[in-house]
Amino acid sequence: MASIFERIRLRPTQLRTVADRRLDDAQYLCDSRLNARANAAMYLAGFVIECLLKARLLEKFRWLQSTRSPERLQRREQRIWSLCYRSHDLDEILVHMPEVWERMAAFEQRGQGRLANGLKTVCAQWTIYARYSPHSSNITEASLFVERIRELKPCLL
């Protein structure tokens, strides 16, 4: 049986499956109504956005799915490889995907809220450092954050 700790490169469909599972996990934590679970819910919800953006990166830059060594890549390609496999900087990932903003605008034109602002806010707030934070959120804030992620998710598929 494979270990959950095994280091593997995921395909875009696998990343989307992981995103679905982590969003379910975040919702489960919010449904507990326990403030002690708020930070974990928010961390997992933000991770959903990271997974979805990285799935899009893999589709846009198909060469990322190859086993080429990053040292053999040109500087720009190395940066994109690093964003996919080493970074968690959502804002920086979005710099290389202007089509995400175009997709957000299309959703907004169909009357689906202020999604672009929501994504900007999430990307500016969320960081992997939340997993180390000594500060505590509350379950109400976490529930709102998870709901925002749920609203953004269809735009990132």
Image: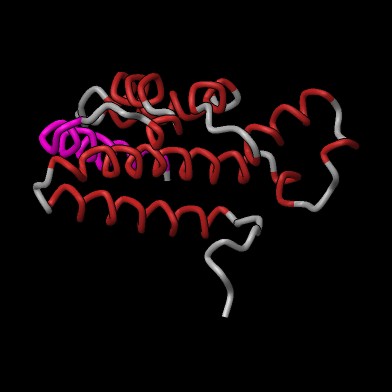
Quarter of the image with the N terminus in it: bottom right
Q: Residue furthest right?
A: 72
Q: Quadrant of residue 118?
A: top left
Does 139 appear in magenta? yes
Front residue of 66 and 106:
66
Q: Quadrant of residue 131?
A: top left
Q: How is the image coloured?
A: secondary structure
Q: Quadrant of residue 111?
A: top left
**Residue drawn at 16 percent across, 39 percent down:** 143
In the figure, is residue 4 to the left or right of 132? Answer: right
Per the rendered image, the range of residues in magenta is 137-156
Does 31 appear in magenta? no
In the figure, is residue 91 to the left or right of 28? Answer: right
Circle count = 0
Q: Position of residue 20 (x, y in %)?
A: 36, 55
Q: Position of residue 79 (x, y in %)?
A: 72, 27
Front residue of 141 and 122:
141
Front residue of 123 and 103:
123
In the figure, is residue 153 to the left or right of 69? Answer: left
**Residue drawn at 29 percent across, 43 percent down:** 40
**Residue drawn at 58 percent across, 74 percent down:** 2
* Helix, strand or loop for the magenta stretch, by majority: helix
**Residue drawn at 32 percent across, 29 percent down:** 134
Image height of 28 relative to 60, above or below: below
- Tell me if I can see residue 154 in this picture: no
Q: Position of residue 155 (x, y in %)?
A: 36, 38
Q: Position of residue 37 (x, y in %)?
A: 21, 45
- Tell me if I can see residue 28 in this picture: yes
Q: Residue furthest front?
A: 134
